[in-house]
Image (cartoon, rainbow, N blue to C red):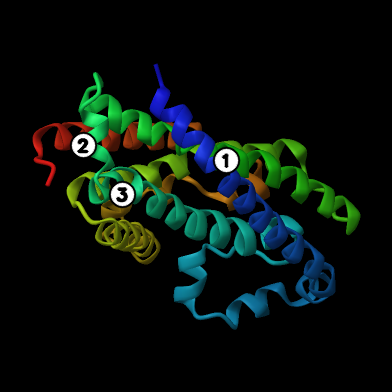
Amino acid sequence: MFELTRYDGRHRLKGSVYLSIAMSLLAVVVIWIYPSFSGSFENVDEEFLQAYPDQIIQMFNIQTMASLEGFLAFELYVFGWIILLGLYLAYLAAGAIAGDVECGRMDILLSMPISRARTVGEKFASLAVPIVVVNLITPFVVYVAAVLVGEPLSAADLAAVHLLSIPYLFACAGIGLIASVAVDRTSIAQRIALGVTFGLFMLESLLSGTDYEVIGAVAPMRYFDPNEILLESTYDLTGAGVLIVMTVACVVASQLWFRRRDIQ
């Protein structure tokens, strides 16, 4: 069991370590520059935020820059986790099936005694490697860097933001998986995944607080709020449950779709 997951997981491990190093470096840079701005933010935080267009404030859910938690929520977690990692996981998942179909490996896989549904499920499960690795390494770097600049963070809140990001990243990967079974060409599947994921981010950001806010309920970004965790120590377990349901729905839909389609 899980031969495909283990095989793909091993091949994703090296890239996952590089990804973790990149995100850790981003975190270090953000934390390193914060002390040089913190004094100004404490005095003119409200005026500073008013200088941003309302659309930017709403899009990135900027609440405060006067604390390291607020600074990290915007500079690292909204930008780095919700946008960059969300898009990356969707992009990565988009090649999971389409890549093997395009290069002919899928014909070999399907000649083995393994169902199409299991193939899709195990390919998707291998994405746990980058998701888990980046959320294991980076929080330690963030915590130590914050202590070194004299702005210690709550270990519980930091752990929570990374744990609750895992269902979010899986949900973004689920979007990419659907794109991967929908088309045969990897490049097209990846463009679709990136476009849909970023489109959902824009949809949720721009419709929040409007009469059409309910439409944004389809976006995974609604259910993961770093500001809520880091600034208020509030953990949205219901939102995490919704993201898990979204992920399962994407995987099941992908399995059903792949079972019924022809491989060219």
| Crowding near the residue tagged with mark 2, few <14, some 14–19, many ≥20 C-alpha atoms within 10 Å | few
Q: Residue at x 25, y 21 (%)?
A: 114
Q: Quadrant of residue 63?
A: bottom right
Please say if 215 is above or below 178: below
**Disc 3 vs disc 1: Cβ atoms closer than 8 Å?**
no
In whole angstroms, how far apart are the C-alphas of marks 2 and 1? 25 Å
Q: Nearer the viewer, residue 26 or 109?
A: 109
Tell me: 169 left or right of 211. Answer: right
**Quarter of the image containing the N terminus?**
top left
Tell me: 224 left or right of 42. Answer: left
Amino acid type at mark 3: Gly
Amino acid type at mark 1: Leu
Please say if 7 is above or below 57: above
In whole angstroms, how far apart are the C-alphas of marks 3 and 2? 12 Å
Give the percent coordinates (x, y) of residue 164. Answer: 54, 38
Q: Which residue is mark 2?
A: 107
* 3 vs 2, front mark: 2
> Residue farthest to the top?
1
Q: Which residue is mark 1?
A: 13
Give the percent coordinates (x, y) of residue 200. Answer: 33, 58
Please say if 117 is above or below 89: above
In whole angstroms, how far apart are the C-alphas of marks 3 and 1? 18 Å
Q: Name which of mark 3 and mark 1 comes first in the sequence.
A: 1
* Mark 2: secondary structure: helix
Amino acid type at mark 2: Asp
* 2 vs 1, front mark: 2
Q: Name which of mark 2 and mark 1 comes first in the sequence.
A: 1
Tell me: 128 left or right of 255. Answer: right
Please say whether residue 165 is visible from this viewpoint. Answer: no
Q: Which residue is mark 3?
A: 99
* Mark 1: secondary structure: helix
Q: Nearer the viewer, residue 135 or 101?
A: 101
